[in-house]
Image: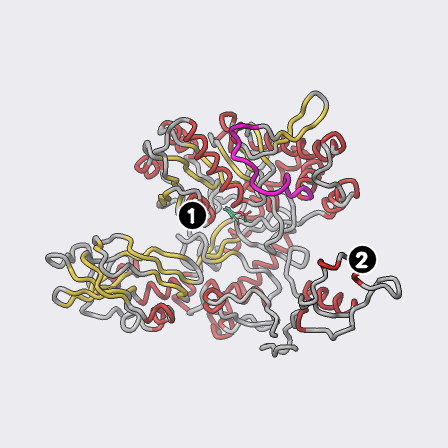
Amino acid sequence: MAQPEGLLYSKEHEWVKIDGDNATVGITDYAQDSLGDIVYVELPKIGRQVVQFASVGVVESVKAVSDLFTPVGGEVTEVNAGLENDPALVNREPFEGGWLFKVKLSGDAQTSGLLSAADYESFTKES
Amino acid sequence: MSTPVSDHTATPLIFESGQDGRANRYFERGKSLDQFLPREALRAELPIPDNSEMDVVRHFTRLSQRTFGIDVGFYPLGSCTMKYNPRVNDAMANLPGLRDLHPYTPDDQAQGALRIMWELERSLCSLFGMAAFSLNPSAGAHAELAALLIAKAYFKGRGETKRDKVIVPDTAHGTNPASAAMCGFKVISLKSDKRGRVSVDEVKKVLGDDTAVVMMTNPNTLGLFEDHVHEITRAVHEAGGLCYYDGANANALMGNARPGDMGFDLMHLNLHKTFTIPHGGGGAGSGPLGVAKHLVDFLPTPYVRKKNDSFVLDFDMPKSIGPMRSFWSNFAHIVRALAYVYANGAEGLTKVSQLAVLNANYMRVKIREFLETPYDEICRHEFVASAQELKKETGVRALDIAKALLDRGYMAPTIYFPLIVPECLMIEPTETESKETLDAFVDALRDIVETAKREPEKILAAPVTTVVGRLDETRAAREPDLRWRPTS
Ligand SMILES: Cc1ncc(COP(=O)(O)O)c(C=O)c1O
């Protein structure tokens, strides 16, 4: 499974795209494939302050309910409204239209503990 | 009006069939319904379908023929103990003196029924090492709820209101955290160790003066015995918490090991699993709740007591959490379970769990020739296999294997549970299956794996022999349509 370059990855299978102060978060192709058909996504409220690696929501598939963790800390500025009616978008386009939420980073972008595309690729092979 | 059905072989709803005036009526000639029922009870607006008796019989017979159950074939659903339900149990539950007894019958005229409840309760106490059982709860999950209400009342009585955490392993059934959340507890999930067990160190890390209850399933849902259970229950007690035993897997140790001896304060049994009661359709179950001595006063009411030589329903228990349901229990199930206990005796019940463990290990060793078995050691009454490698190699997942098993005449095992095993298949054969059946199932599974390697598209297209093929699970979860509504 190809991991897009230019993103950072968490061991909880989220990706984050950092653009200056702003970060976009989603779950990886590996995660959506393991979860199976996604039926519901519960996202954090806009304006909420989130701490890196905290549980901020829930992803429910036909198989299981899983916690959603944020790979970066800051203030939630936007959530993907399209997922309310079409949560399967996460299955179809995990790295594009299926993004989950956006965060305005607090202070310096904390990227410690996150993996590069290549490291994440080998991480998924081990587990 | 009948609505079009999407599949030409699907059975129409009974509401969508029939014609006005077709129903067979058994009233005396010349009499009408209002001569039997008070006028205000007659509701013309109810769309009760007018079907002939024969059509009704055909309708329900047809549905029953399309239903897969333990009476039809092998049903290796993990952590569900789908064993054969002896017909003698039903014969006993159908004895007119028991079947027709009204729950409000005064105690002195229902001595036989009360005695049955008392004898089952005593049998369960001695088999599982508890001081008392309430037969009140109607399912395992219902008993979990009762147990956590008891824990709440117990800590409140001791002034320990800070205890608001329930600790649950990551292999637990979803009902454990759900019951805890329903009682207002915060749930802490425990990561299993490499051996698939609850780790004593991990438990100790989260124990404290805010711990209310630690819930454990033993053997756990990987089919593995929690071999540090004594150390864990001791540590929980030292921290002032209570230990709950989820008895869904009691078929693995009945007669051989007792949760009471392991240090558990509360436990449930699923009579519908371990004690041969038909289940699986969401119908009536029975989940007796067992407690150790210090919690007996909190049990739901009523509780059957023996006074001198007679039996009474005791409603006068000031510390009780109150009744968990209407009337006293799903009484017919109490009769079935006691019939099973007496048919087997202590020795027979001990053998039941030994054979359940033997059957599971026999299958595990045969299945690991062609599917991974991630925790490869002697298991208890069930074990997990994984289709992770097969999926990487062929794209065929656990779900596809499950569908292909339907084509081969089997109920699929539990899949994708426990959550910690990727592409999980959880297999529980039970003691009531013959070696021939186990062998035939293993052969079917092997055939599916081999076909997947040669022609994966065949398995991905399964099932092809069932009335309907792949269902839209996403839509079923998002837009469940479970209720018929009149069209006009
Ligand atoms: C481990 C475990 N605990 C609890 C339950 C809940 O039992 P019930 O379905 O009787 O409510 C189940 C049911 O399958 C189970 O497997």
Q: Name the quadrant containing residue B193.
A: top left
**Relative depth, front residue between B434 and A72:** A72
In the rendered structure, the answer to whether residue B131 lies left or right of residue A48 reads: right
Residue A65 percent across, percent down from the top left = 40, 57
| Vertical comparison of B219 with B439: above or below | above
Residue at numbered disc 2: B36
Q: Chain of mark 2?
A: B
Q: Earlier in the sequence, mark 2 or mark 1?
A: 2
In the rendered structure, the answer to whether residue B47 lies left or right of residue B77 reads: right
Residue B479 percent across, percent down from the top left = 48, 67
Label placed on residue B112: none
Label placed on residue B171: 1
* Rendered-image quadrant of the N terminus of chain B: bottom right
* Rendered-image quadrant of the C terminus of chain B: bottom right
Looking at the image, the residue that sits furthest to the front is B40
In the rendered structure, the answer to whether residue B68 lies left or right of residue B162 reads: right
Residue B159 percent across, percent down from the top left = 38, 27
